[in-house]
Amino acid sequence: MTPTIVCAPDSFKGSAGAPAAAAALARGVRQAFPAATITELPFADGGEGTLEALLAVWGTPARTVDVVDALGRPTTARYGLSADGRTAVIEAAQANGLPQVSDVPLDPERADTYGVGLIAAQVLDDGVDEILLCIGGSASTDGGAGIVAALGAALTDSAGEPIAPGGGGLSALAAVDASGLDPRARTVSWRIAVDVDNPLTGPRGAAAVFGPQKGADAATVTRLDDNLAHFAEVLGSEHAATPGFGAAGGIPLALTALLGAEVVPGSRMVAEAVGLTAALAGADLVLTGEGSFDAQSLGGKVVAAVRDHSPASASIIVVAGRVGLTPAECREAGIAAALSIAPGPADLPELSARAEELIEATAAHACALVAAGHQQTGHQQKGH
């Protein structure tokens, strides 16, 4: 048998990026099927690691631009362009992520998205037609106000003065003047990848659910929630209760209202960007994986997207750091098998340090079983 096999994993967070994980799976596959046609297809769900995954598939290098972090301090950010230069991918956390401001006390009301807007301004200068904006891991709760401000919108108070940056400044907002927006920001196609269904405001909103991890206490959460509701009112947006608009401190709010952005599930966006359906079309066997495979993995994450785009005849094997589903649950979900890379008792640092080696070994074991099954089938057929 010379099967066609696709290796399409997510990153193993903190252990192996999606390109490294895909390469490790492929090395394991070759041990059992040395003559197989193997495709490495790093994948992501629109969150952390999407930039790296798309660059690997597009075969283009990361670019850098001078921006500011969530507290307005100078920094650099990475972004990517497709091979034809028409599509850009931006990970918002490159400019407004929590890690970049971890060296100082968190300031949830000051943190903003202005730096993300500076990345967007650069890709407009690059001449793109489409911007894929991935928005996880943010330190901000400003409803995307900083992004549109960086692109030329004027957010002013009752005296006509610019409001303070961050979600805290939105309390003084009286008007949004979009006349100064870079016209290219309105003609380019924006797609915002979200992997949560939280609304903008309320008990499941951006401030209530994600504010505490950004340093917001109960009183600050209330203020930020009120300010986001006020921002939506000033913008004339009806999306305060729309699922997904609470992602990354409410970034979708301003970008949909002023730039016509489309909010899409992250895995769907990436699937279209990498041509997932076409890549999987002829596969006999598909190996995918992630750091932790559990029930959440089946709700719009990478494993679910790979499964949904695979041909019905293909067997799907999941390789993961941790497997939280029973064999019966896997079968019910359309997964042939799910295997943990843990070879025995081990702590997380040990597994992380050896992640690529263990991913390769687990894939080799899995494919050896598949190969043995095909050999057994062949023997039975000869016997008849």
Image (spheres, grey):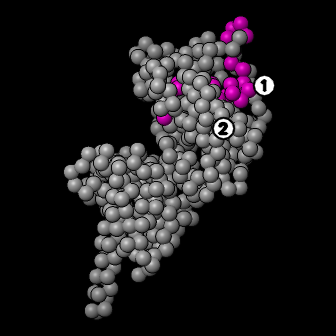
In the rendered view, does 45 fall on the left or right side of 293?
Answer: right
In the rendered view, does 153 fall on the left or right side of 229?
Answer: right
197, above or below 302, in the image: above
**Local secondary structure at mark 1:** loop
- Kindly identify which residue carries mark 1: 179
- Number of marks present in the image shown: 2
- Which residue corresponds to the image point at 49% horizontal and 24% vertical from the top-left? 201
Label 1 neighbour load within 10 Å: few <14, some 14-19, many 20+: few
Residue pushed farthest top?
159
Q: Which residues are magenta?
A: 137-160
Nearer-the-camera pick, 326 or 35: 35
Magenta region includes residue 52: no
Which mark's residue is nearer the viewer, 1 or 2?
A: 2
The part of the image, by quadrant, that contains residue 312 is bottom left
- Is residue 380 something that shows in the picture? yes
Magenta region includes residue 141: yes
Label 2 neighbour load within 10 Å: few <14, some 14-19, many 20+: some
**Mark seen at residue 65:** 2
The part of the image, by quadrant, that contains residue 233 is top right
Nearer-the-camera pick, 71 or 237: 71
Going by the numbered disc 1, the residue's amino acid type is: Ser
- Is residue 203 something that shows in the picture? no
Residue 52 position in % (x across, y down): 54, 49
- Which residue corresponds to the image point at 41% horizontal and 16% vertical from the top-left? 217
